[in-house]
Image (tube, rainbow, N blue to C red):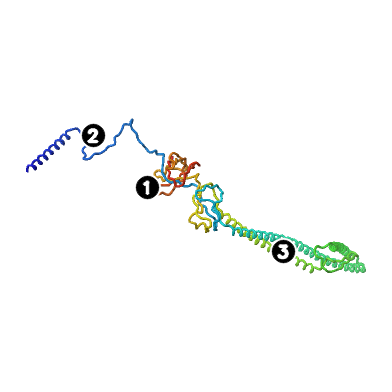
Amino acid sequence: MTHKIKGLVLLFMIILVVGSLAACTAAQPSSSPSGIKAGSGSLAIKTPVPSKSSAVTTVTPQNKVSGTGTIDAANYANLNFGSAGQVIAINVKKGDHVTRDAVLAKLDTADLEVALAQAKVAQGQSSVLLTQAKTGLDQAKLAQVQANTALAAAQFNLDRTAAVKDIQDEISKLQRQIEVSKQMMAERIALNSEGSADYYLSQIKTAQAQLIKQQKDLLDLLTGSETGTVMAGVATYEIGGQEYDRLVVQDVRMKELAVEVAQNVVDQTATGITLAQLGIDQANNGLVLAQKNLDLIKKHIDQSTIAAPFDGLVAGVNPRVGDFITIPAALPKPVIFLIDPASLELVIAANELDVPRVKIGQKAAVSIDAFPDIKLDGQVSAISSVPTLHGSVVDYDITITFPVPSNMEVKVGMNAAAVITAE
C-alpha cells in the first residue's frame, strides 16, 4: 500500500511540472529557434537563405547535352562473295590491319575460267557470223543495184523497139500517102485540072518532108547501140538506099519479156536484202547474248575474290579454307567483317526535353573510359527520329562521329561519354 501511494504522489508532481512549463511558454513571445516551426509536434528543417554576397550555387549549363554509350565503327563493311564456290584462300585473320584493294579471300574459279574461255570463243563466232551477215547484205544491195540497172536497160530497149515499130508504121503510112497523092495528081493533070493537081503536089511535098524526118529518126534508132543483152534475131531495113542489120532490135514482145525477167530479178534482190537484214538481226542478237554471257562469267570471277574496300581492321573471319559458300544472301554472317578504326562513332541517349537543342554538325567532346586523360573532338552526325522508351522516359539516340589518332588503340565496344555543345 505504501508503494502505491508513493507512485501516485510522483505522478501528480510530474503533471504539475508539465502544466507549469506550458503556462510559461504561452506567456513568452512567439519566437523559435531557426529551423523549428512553432506550434508543431514535429521538426521542419528549413533551407537557410544566404545573403546575395555570400551565395554559392552549382547549376548544370543549359547549352550542354551529355550521355554515355559504347563505341562502334562508323565505317564498316560486311564482305561476302558474289557467287557460290569453294574457298581456296583466306589471306587474313581477325585483328589484321589491311590496306585498300588487298585480296582478303578467294574462291576456286577453275570451272569459271573454262566457261570464260568457251564464252570468248562463242563471242568470236557470233562476231564472225555478224560480219558474214553484213557482207551478205552488201552483196544483196549490190545485186539489187545491178538488177535495177538491167531493168532500166530492158525498159529502154523495149521503149526504143516500140519507137522503131511506130516509126516504121508511120513511114509505111507516109509512103502509101505519097503513092496515092501521085496517082491522084496524075489523074488531075490528065483531066487538065491544074488546081487539083497543085493540091496533090502540095500533099506529096508535105508527106515527103515528114517521111524524110521519120527515116532520119529511124536511122538514129537503128544505128544507135542498145543497152543490155543482145538477143537473137535478124531483120533488114532499107533506108536511103542502104540496108541496116537489126541484130539488136527485136520485136516488142521479146523486149517485154526481157523487162519482165529484169523485174523478177529486182524483186528477188529485194527479198534477198530482207533476208540479209534478218540475218544481221539474228547475228546481232547472238552477239549480244554471247557478250552478256561473257560479262556474267567475268562478273562471277570478279565476285569470287574479296578485296578490302578501304584501309581497315579485320574484325571477323567466318569461313575456313575448303568450306563451300552457297548463296551469299543465305549466309548468317559475312565472310569478312571489316571496320575502319580511324573513324569511330558513339551513340548516346538524350532525353526528349534535350533533343530539340541538338543539331546535326554540333561539336561534342568525347571521353573514353580507357583513356581518361584524353578528350577527342567529335560532332553530331545523326539524330534518330524514332524514340527509345524506358518506362515513361522518352529518349532519342544521337550519333557522334570522331576521328581517332593513330597512336590510340581505341577498340569497338569500349565505354565512352560525350558532352554536346547544344544551342
Name the residue type under label 1: Val
Report crowding for label 2: few under 14, some 14 to 19, many 20 or more residues within 10 A (C-alpha): few
Of 49 and 89, the residue lying toward us: 89
- Residue identified by numbered label 1: 393
- Residue identified by numbered label 2: 33
Classify the position of the N terminus by image quarter: top left
Dividing the picture into quadrants, the one containing residue 142 is: bottom right
Asked which secondary structure carries label 2, the reply is loop
Of 58 and 165, the residue lying toward us: 58
**Is 239 placed left or right of 401 in the picture?**
right
Name the residue type under label 2: Pro
Q: CA distance from mark 2 to mark 1?
A: 43 Å
Above or below 336: residue 368: above
Residue 62 visible in the picture? yes
- Residue identified by numbered label 3: 269
Dividing the picture into quadrants, the one containing residue 185 is: bottom right
